[in-house]
Image: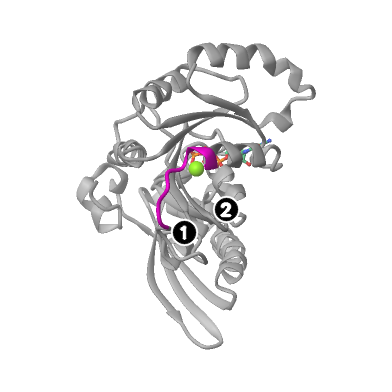
Amino acid sequence: MTNHAGFVAIIGKPNVGKSTLLNSLIGQKISITSRKPQTTRQNITGVRTEEKCQILFVDTPGIHTTKSRALNRYMNRSARLALKDVDVVLLVLDRDRFGKEDEYVSEVFLQNNAKKIVVVNKIDLYEDSIKLLPFLADLQNKYPDAALIPLSAKKEKNLDTLLKVVKNCLPIAPFYFPDDQLTDRSERFLVSEIIREKIMRQFGREIPHQTVVALERMKIEKEIVNIDATVFVEKNSQKRILIGSSGDKIKRVSTDARLDIENLLEKKVMLRTWVKVKSGWSRDDDILKSLGFNEI
Ligand SMILES: Nc1nc2c(ncn2[C@@H]2O[C@H](COP(=O)(O)OP(=O)(O)OP(=O)(O)O)[C@@H](O)[C@H]2O)c(=O)[nH]1
Ligand SMILES: [Mg+2]
């Protein structure tokens, strides 16, 4: 029996729906999502195994042009690294809103030798998708070798078309992962990401990009999982906002995160969360390394 398998990098500017697409394609939440740009910080592979094929979708941080912080440079490097030796590159766009940032990602996309697919996402937001036709014609001129697929990652519309096209691009190869494995990421990583997602979703602009979550302890016992997590922020003022008056804000983060973590681990969870200041962490390569952003 011949198997097909291969890597598919999902790239695009921030906030176009890459992680939502990964989760829908895998059928489980692996990568965190939010309405704010720059949610994903590291590459995350999602594994979709079917009878005769295994597709390894790699979600990447949104490629952006602000490069001042060490963290931003790290995120762009991650995304570019995901493009090495892949079989397919999938460029995700937010409807027909094609701007300067898309143009920047587009250059990276065109330079790659892999097979190319352009996904026009969020089509559920069109009352009448006929409006998209002139844009699709422009895209076909711009990317004559690419397959164009309008879809909705969130409403899971037209994902089957995308899967069909991807499968046709995969080489003959043995499976890379056991067929019951859904991601290359550890449970510890997924847990810390869930906590970060709740912060991204609950707070305004001043907080999200400047937090990092470290798990001090995750002890899995028979009945319960004990987790101690520390959220690092850059400034004292951010610490105050995150904690809230008498701790109500951080308590809500913990409660929301705990429910998701219990779902993921299928066990009761006891989660304790602390907030600490580590100034300049997102600007410093050494601190980033110490927080688990491995050198790339
Ligand atoms: N209406 C609609 N919203 C979507 C769709 N796909 C994603 N979104 C929303 O778009 C926002 C961004 O989604 P993400 O999946 O976090 O985007 P991303 O490209 O991974 O963003 P970064 O990680 O920041 O680069 C979220 O609020 C999603 O719910 C879609 O098909 N339709
Ligand atoms: Mg993302």
Which residue is disc 2 drawn over? 26
Q: Secondary structure at mark 2?
A: helix
In three-dimensional space, the C-alpha distance between marks 2 and 1, rounded to whole angstroms, equals 9 Å
| Residue farthest toward the left in the current orientation of the protein | 286
Report if residue 168 lies within the magenta region: yes
Which residue is disc 1 drawn over? 183
- Residue 166 seen: yes
In the rendered view, does 73 fall on the left or right side of 59?
left
Q: As shown in the figure, which amino acid type bears the numbered disc 1?
A: Thr
Q: As shown in the figure, which amino acid type bears the numbered disc 2?
A: Ile
The span shown in magenta is 167-174
User: Alpha-carbon neighbours of circle 1 within 10 Å: few (<14), some, or many (≥20)?
Assistant: many
Residue 180 picture location, percent across and down = 52, 67
The residue depicted at 40 percent of the width and 26 percent of the height is 109
Magenta: main secondary structure: loop
Would you place residue 292 above or below residue 218 in this image? above
Would you place residue 211 above or below residue 257 in this image? above
Residue 207 picture location, percent across and down = 47, 45
Residue 88: image quadrant is top left
Q: Secondary structure at mark 1?
A: loop
The residue depicted at 47 percent of the width and 54 percent of the height is 2
Report if residue 221 lies within the magenta region: no
Query: Whereabouts is ligand 1, in terms of quadrant?
Result: top right
The residue depicted at 30 percent of the width and 49 percent of the height is 279
- Do tag 2 and tag 1 residues touch (Cβ < 8 Å)? yes
Residue 11 picture location, percent across and down = 45, 35
